[in-house]
Image (tube, rainbow, N blue to C red):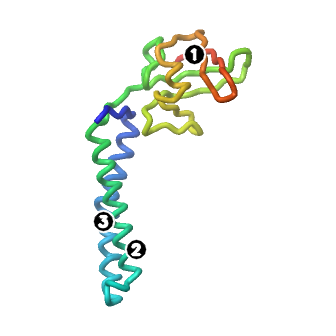
Amino acid sequence: MAEIFMTAEGKKQLEDRLYDLKVNGRAEAAEKIRVAREFGDLSENAEYDIAKEEQAKMEAEIAEIEAKLRDVKIIESSGKGNVVDIGSKVRICLAGSTDEIEYEIVGTHESNPMEGRISNESPLGKALIGKRKDEEVTVKAPAGDVKYRILKLL
């Protein structure tokens, strides 16, 4: 499997989620199944079917998180460099505008544009990587090319 880029904070959140699922989630699922079994005939027991379905979804999430954690590569905030890379925080603006936007370039699994975290695989992330302060980048968008200027690496 390919490397999964994450911040140390993102990895910790994933590890915490995994722990919660394994300890609390499994205990809750087992209790739901136990209670549902008490309702009688399992072939006509909707509560039992629902509890087993929830358990299967949870086990799938556990397996998915474990697989991600095996392939995680920790990225460090690269405030020390002068070239945009994964882990960089950048301040940009639309070319010809003074409205500034700040982004952190992160791996796909941690991206959340509403929180200012864009993926290294997103069109803007790809365009920014390898560039320096005061350079312009062009991002292809459905409405046409959009140009941004890098104001600062944070």
Q: Are marks 2 and 3 in contact (CB under 8 Å)?
A: no
Q: CA distance from mark 1 to mark 2?
A: 52 Å
Question: SS at mark 1?
Answer: strand
The residue located at (35%, 76%) in the rendering is 32
Question: SS at mark 3?
Answer: helix
Number of the label disc, if any, that sits on residue 152:
1
- Amino acid bearing label 2: Ile
Residue 54 shows in the view: yes
Question: SS at mark 2?
Answer: helix
Q: CA distance from mark 2 to mark 3?
A: 15 Å
Q: Position of residue 21 (x, y in %)?
A: 33, 59
Residue 151 shows in the view: no
Mark 2 lies on residue: 50
Q: Count neighbours of disc 3 (C-alpha within 10 A) and say few if under 14, some if 14 to 19, many if 20 or more.
A: some
Residue 95 vertical placement versus 108 (above, below): above
Taking the view exactly as shown, the residue that stands out farthest to the left is: 70
Q: Quadrant of the N terminus?
A: top left
Mark 2 or 3, nearer chain start: 3
The residue located at (37%, 76%) in the rendering is 49
Q: Position of residue 62 (x, y in %)?
A: 31, 54
Q: Quick check: 27 left or right of 107? A: left
Residue 144 vertical placement versus 21 (above, below): above
- Amino acid bearing label 3: Arg
Mark 3 or 1, nearer chain start: 3
Q: Position of residue 56 (x, y in %)?
A: 33, 64
- Amino acid bearing label 1: Lys
